[in-house]
Amino acid sequence: MKNVLNNIFKPKVCRQMPKGDSDFDKLGIALKTEIHAIFGRSLAIRALDSGSDNSAEIELNNLSNPYYDIERFGISFVASPRHADILIVTGAVSQNMAVAVRKTFDAMPSPKLVIALGDDACGNGIVCGGYGVLGGVDKILPVDLKIPGNPPEPIQIITALLGLMRSLGKK
């Protein structure tokens, strides 16, 4: 009974949460500047799982957690492709998901940017070549950027996004 009362009324001890990563913050601020120069507003991303093992989704979701908090750099994830500037596809495209991937792309407004995230989406994963798999996203959609890795880390994702924005700014 004493332990129960101690757990309820005793002050909780937890580790101090790290304040963040300065390299990530510098990349994010540069990315925010590029996004504002190109779009004049925030960047909307629609994530689409086309048959992955969820490792790339976990890293993508980590971008929204309190540690990385990518929304402070003007990037948000949207639920509808009709509101998205970028489609991030994870996983190798399975035969059953090919139509859904194509319909999602068709529902997007211009500029219809597509990013393949992870080895499977880039066509280099272990499931590519399987009987139920078409392959990488580039088999059915025009891919603007490939971010390899199994899975790519958040800093790799934001670095690649910065590179994409800089290449768009030069056009």
Image: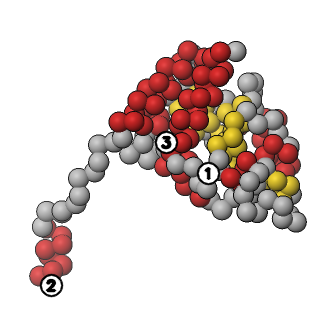
Separation (CA) of disc 3 from disc 2: 47 Å
Q: Nearer the viewer, residue 107 or 74?
A: 74
* Camera-nearest label, 3 or 2: 3
Q: Which residue is mark 2?
A: 1
Q: How is the image coloured?
A: secondary structure
Who's the residue at 61% across and 51% down the image? Answer: 149
In the rendered image, which quarter is residue 107 located in? top right
Which residue type carries mark 3? Ile
Q: Residue 41, relative to residue 113: is it above or below?
A: above
Q: Which residue is mark 3?
A: 155
Q: Residue 47, relative to residue 7: is it above or below?
A: above
Separation (CA) of disc 1 from disc 2: 50 Å
The x and y percentages for residue 93 are 79, 53
Q: Residue 86, relative to residue 136: is it above or below?
A: above
Does residue 60 appear in this view?
A: yes
Disc on the earlier residue, 3 or 2: 2
